[in-house]
């Protein structure tokens, strides 16, 4: 403005001079006219630039304040007015400390700082602003020194950083909470960069592994604590699921693995690894793990108990069948014993007859006069022992005895094939033969209540399985079917039930269908029939483990399936499918 005023004064002087010059020097008129035009253009240009600069300052989001050398406020833009609550008239000429309290001020407004500050050098400083109502707020102040003409002014740019400070506080609180969580959780948590080096580790992980946090940060995680498999073989880094996480961005959940501790012992763990993303770029991985020593011990104990329970159920089944098997064996052994005694007596009589005949023949040969008497005694003996009857009965007795012994042998063989003692690995088994053995063993359970029909597929290939487990599963279903029919026959005692067992090949599976026309299973309990200890029988008539063990044998131990279709009053059908190779896929792969 001073420059414009000066130019305007000069223009006035020049104008007067021009009027005087026109009278004196007409030849200078054109030059003065041109000079006048230049001055007008310059004035207009200065006015435009001033308005343009003010518009920029007024539009700025930050507060802009100018003071003179003594700190008196000269100008503040609209943002500063809104920020501090003052109008230009209210604050103009007042000390900058009104807006920036002196006790909080440590910036270039201090005179000593002004004297040291070079022109156009900006200094930034965090301080507090004070509004017209007396409230304060955090502010970021950037101050610069300017020298328009002979003056020296301070240009201050003030930014209200309340939201930033609140965000920083929230971030600090969040980080503190995260740190507290990391240090409070029982799971071990650590992070690695894309080279596999530790970047952070919580106290739980440090305690479990035996290293301090300071010892681990920056160390190579795989080489330090994940280098060896349980069998002693080398665990290569490129095969490590944690490396897969930060190299391919794939999260991994490992249910059982080993981490190695500082003292050289191994720690069984379950862990989850997830990639850490930053601006669409993987910068590492975070791993959460827990010690599963107790779980493994509990699993071993569970398996031990399961074996004991399985053996107990097997003993129960054998005990249940024992009386029937004893009866099945007792009948043929009884008539074998009776026939043997008959043969023993017949043998004694025949030997006596043979002895008399031998003496008679010898007497006849030697001309002994007693030959006729001996011949008469032999004839009398033959009549006494009913030799013709013995000729007919002895072959029958021998045949019956051999048949009885064959039946006993068949039962003993069936028991042996049913139990398969010592078979702990899967082996290829003739499923039809195995089922027949189970039928023979359980004969006394069903023969009084049902007829049992079989439709075996002669082309069924051998199935790789644990024969003892499968036989037990089939036995449990047959016995349940016999009991269901027996319960139904209480209402219709004159009508025998039917149990039908069929086999066939279906894709990669061998299918066993066991159907009975017993009373069926009520719909409300059908979902529970495979639950351990669930039974509908009375106290002392079962442990409730039969179908539970059947399910475990088929599904858990053979990757097979078992389905049940039952209607009350009509009967029940169990369909078992076993993978022929003993390994095929998951149970969902079954047809």
Image: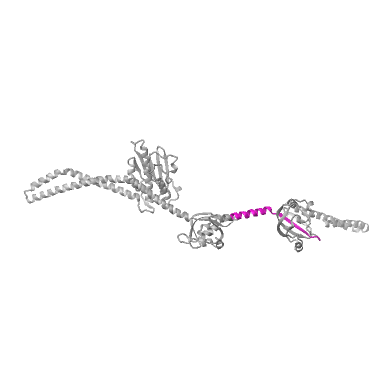
Q: Is residue 294 magenta?
A: no
Tally of numbered discs:
0
Residue 300 vs 330, above or below: the answer is below
- Residue 404 visible in the current orientation: yes
Please identify the residue farthest to the right as the structure is shown.
23
- Residue 275 visible in the current orientation: no
User: Nearest the camera: 541 or 348?
Assistant: 541
User: In which quadrant of the rendered view does residue 201 lie?
Assistant: bottom right
Residue 303 place in picture, x, y as percent: 42, 52
Left or right of 194 on screen, residue 441: left
Q: Can you say which quadrant of the picture contains the N terminus?
A: bottom right
Residue 246 place in picture, x, y as percent: 55, 57
Q: Which residues are magenta?
A: 149-178
Residue 442 vs 200, above or below: the answer is above
Residue placed at 7% from the left, 51% from the top? 366
Residue placed at 24% from the left, 46% from the top? 336
Left or right of 466 on screen, residue 13: right
């Amino acid at each position: 403005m001073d420059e414009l005023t000066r130019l305007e004064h000069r223009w006035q002087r020049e104008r007067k001079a021009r009027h005087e010059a026109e009278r004196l020097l007409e030849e200078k008129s054109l030059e003065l006219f041109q000079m006048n035009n230049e001055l007008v253009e310059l004035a207009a240009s200065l006015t435009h630039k001033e308005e343009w600069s003010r518009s920029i300052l007024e539009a700025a989001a930050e507060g802009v304040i100018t003071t003179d050398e003594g700190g008196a406020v000269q100008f503040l833009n609209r943002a500063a007015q809104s920020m501090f609550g003052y109008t230009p008239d209210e604050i103009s000429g007042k000390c900058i400390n009104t807006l920036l309290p002196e006790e909080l001020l440590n910036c270039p407004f201090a005179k000593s700082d002004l004297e040291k500050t070079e022109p156009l050098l900006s200094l930034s400083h965090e301080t507090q602003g004070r509004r017209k109502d007396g409230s304060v707020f955090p502010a970021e102040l950037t101050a610069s020194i300017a020298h328009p003409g002979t003056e020296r002014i301070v240009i201050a740019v003030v930014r209200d950083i309340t939201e930033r400070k609140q965000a920083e506080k929230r971030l600090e609180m969040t980080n503190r909470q995260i740190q507290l969580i990391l240090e409070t959780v029982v799971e071990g948590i650590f992070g690695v960069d894309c080279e596999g080096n530790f970047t952070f580790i919580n106290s739980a992980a440090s305690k479990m592994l035996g290293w301090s946090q300071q010892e681990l940060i920056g160390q190579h995680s795989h080489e330090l604590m994940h280098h060896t498999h349980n069998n002693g073989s080398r665990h290569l880094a490129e095969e490590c699921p944690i490396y897969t996480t930060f190299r391919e961005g794939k999260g991994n959940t490992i249910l059982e693995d080993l981490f190695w501790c500082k003292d050289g012992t191994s720690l069984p763990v379950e862990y989850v690894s997830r990639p850490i993303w930053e601006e669409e770029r993987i910068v590492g991985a975070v791993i959460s793990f827990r010690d599963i020593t107790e779980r493994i011990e509990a699993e071993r104990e569970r398996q031990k108990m399961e074996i004991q329970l399985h053996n107990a159920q097997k003993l129960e089944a054998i005990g249940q069948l024992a009386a029937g098997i004893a009866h099945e064996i007792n009948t043929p052994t009884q008539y074998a014993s009776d026939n043997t005694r008959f043969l023993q007596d017949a043998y004694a009589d025949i030997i006596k007859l043979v002895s008399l005949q031998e003496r008679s023949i010898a007497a006849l040969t030697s001309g002994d006069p007693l030959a006729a008497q001996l011949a008469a005694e032999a004839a009398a003996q033959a009549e006494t022992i009913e030799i013709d009857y013995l000729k007919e009965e002895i072959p029958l007795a021998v045949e019956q005895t051999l048949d009885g012994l064959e039946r006993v042998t068949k039962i003993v063989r069936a028991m042996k094939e049913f139990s398969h003692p010592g078979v702990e690995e899967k082996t290829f088994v003739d499923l039809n033969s195995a089922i027949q053995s189970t039928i023979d063993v359980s004969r006394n359970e069903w023969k009084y209540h049902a007829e049992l029909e079989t439709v075996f597929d002669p082309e069924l290939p051998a199935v790789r399985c644990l024969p003892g487990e499968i036989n037990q599963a089939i036995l449990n279903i047959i016995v349940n079917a016999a009991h269901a029919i027996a319960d139904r026959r209480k209402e219709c005692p004159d009508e025998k039930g039917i149990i039908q067992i069929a086999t066939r090949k279906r894709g990669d599976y061998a299918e066993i269908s066991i159907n009975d026309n017993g009373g069926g299973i009520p719909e409300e309990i059908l979902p529970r029939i495979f639950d351990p200890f669930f039974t509908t029988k009375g106290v002392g008539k079962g442990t409730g483990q039969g179908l539970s063990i059947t399910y475990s044998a088929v599904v858990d131990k053979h990757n097979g399936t078992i389905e049940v279709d039952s209607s009350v009053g009509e009967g029940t059908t169990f369909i078992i499918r076993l993978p022929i190779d003993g390994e095929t896929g998951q149970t969902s792969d079954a047809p």
